[in-house]
Image: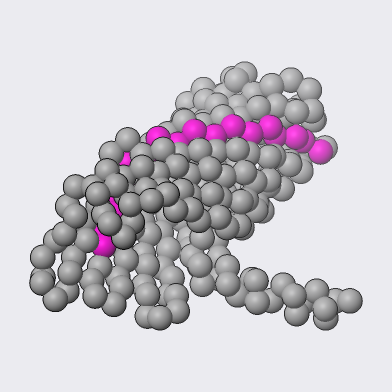
Amino acid sequence: MVRTVTRLWLPYCLTLLISGCMSSGLYETARTSPPGQLEHILAVELKADVRKLSGIPHLDWWSGDFHPAPMYALRLGLFRNCDLGLRLGLGAAGLSAKYTFWDGEPAFALVADAAGSFAILPMAFADTRKRLGGSLLVSGGTGVVGYAASLGAGYRREESSFEFGRSDEQSWDIIASGGLPLMLGDRVRIMPVLSAGVPVWTRYLEWDFAESTAVYPNPDVRRLTLSAGISVSLVAPRDDWEPWAPGR
């Protein structure tokens, strides 16, 4: 049975490994890890990315990309209300910093996040993605289940090369997400998250190697990114937390 499952899932995992996917959800609350303590987050999500580039004949239609994006994150508390995080996706990595400026009920925090990936796909097609953004996190609640929400802006740049040219797409996006942290005891947190991103500014350029000129310099780019996922976290205990408190 184990060998059968391994044979079925190994090609799928290798496909994810070269895809360079990074989850878009943060899967954390506004609370930081205590100084010197580690927090582990394991998450998996499904991402849907649809777009249309009006004015470009070969791209003037709605196209979509739907794929899973697993993630492991590690957060280390630097001092009270401030921690650093490392996120690892299959073929991608990212860094983040979080500062809780209001450690009340609810709590508010600012998060800065940077992630990038590089993937080599068949037919000598190279693709790079760079993303830089920040978010405002708020979390709180009563009982076992709390709430966590974020609103932020992010910059994304995607460069692609193909047989006869290359393209460069840049955008500033507004990203919103919401989650329901569920505490199991005082160390384990399960949190489903929904997130969405829409561009407020885009720029797309495409170069023809033969002509050495840019074509389609100002198309109308329409794009929407949706994701849904769930995470399991091992959080560090804090002296000011009550058992079963959700806003961690």
- Residue plotted at (10% across, 70% down): 212
Name the residue nearer the viewer: 63 or 17. 63
Which of the 4 quarters of the picture holds residue 140? top right
Q: Relative to 125, say whether 117 is above or below.
A: above
Describe residue 225's horizontal placement relative to residue 206 as left or right: right
Residue 205 picture location, percent across and down? 21, 56
* Residue 143 rendering spot, x and y as whole percentages: 78, 23
Quadrant containing the C terminus is: top right
Asked whether residue 26 is drawn in magenta, I would say no
Question: Residue 168 sits in which quadrant?
Answer: bottom left
Going by the picture, which residue comes out furthest to the right?
1
Asked whether the viewer can see residue 33, the reply is no
The location of residue 222, given as percent across then percent down, is 36, 42
Residue name at image x 36 percent, y 39 percent:
199
Q: Which residues are magenta?
A: 167-184
Q: Name the quadrant containing residue 145.
A: top right
Colour logic? one colour
Q: Is residue 167 above or below residue 135?
A: below
Q: From this viewpoint, is residue 92 visible?
A: yes
Q: Quadrant of the N terminus?
A: bottom right
Relative side of 227 to 135, left or right: right
Q: Position of residue 167 (x, y in %)?
A: 26, 62
Total marks in image: 0
Q: Residue at x 77, y 35 (%)?
A: 183
| Front residue of this view, candidates 201 and 241 | 201
Q: Main secondary structure of the magenta part?
A: strand
23, 140: nearer the viewer: 23
Is 239 left, or right, of 163 in this rendering?
right
Residue drawn at (37%, 80%), measured in percent from left and top?
A: 124
